[in-house]
Image (cartoon, rainbow, N blue to C red):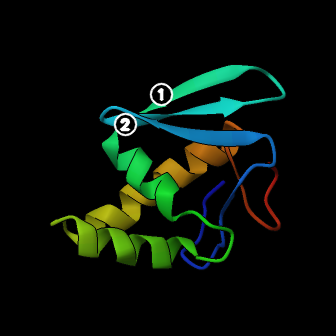
Amino acid sequence: MEIASGTVLRLADDASVQHVGDGAVVLLARSGQLYTCNGTTEAFLDKVDGARSLGQIVGLLCEEFEVDKGTLDEDMAALATDLVSEGILAAPGLDS
């Protein structure tokens, strides 16, 4: 599965994000699984709101961090794919 730039992302219904120290943790209520996130993933999840597309989120992250947009596009698409496959994120038309 590959997530396109125009895909709108949201947290899964049973996922919650808590900010701790230099990162965040994600709790999946249905399974009780707890995931730790680094600062990059935390910044990404902070911008996932159910209204913004992956491309818009990448644009916001480009403003926040000094990084090559092409690299960020690839890295965030891979991250979004992983988060959807883990059930942390949901997107219309994608299995979550």
Residue 19, relative to residue 3: is it above or below?
above
**Residue 35: image x %, image y %?**
55, 27
**Residue 58: image x %, image y %?**
40, 71
- Give the amino acid type for the residue marked by disc 2 in the picture: Gly
| Numbered label attached to residue 81 | none
- Please tell me which residue is depicted at 75% across the width and 49% down the height of the picture: 12
Residue 54, relative to residue 96: is it above or below?
below
Residue of label 1: 36
Q: Secondary structure at mark 1?
A: strand
Can residue 69 be seen at all in this image of the molecule? no
Q: How many marks?
A: 2
- Residue contact between numbered discs 1 and 2, judged by CB atoms under 8 Å: yes
Can residue 43 be seen at all in this image of the molecule? yes
**Residue 13: image x %, image y %?**
81, 48
**Residue 21: image x %, image y %?**
33, 31
Q: Secondary structure at mark 2?
A: strand
Q: Residues within 10 Å of mark 1 (few under 14, many from 20)?
A: some
- Give whichever of 40, 84 is nearer the camera: 40
- Please tell me which residue is depicted at 39% across the width and 61% down the height of the picture: 74
The alpha-carbon separation of the residues under discs 1 and 2 comes to 7 Å
| Numbered label attached to residue 23 | 2
- Give the amino acid type for the residue marked by disc 1 in the picture: Thr
> For this view, does 21 lie left or right of residue 33?
left
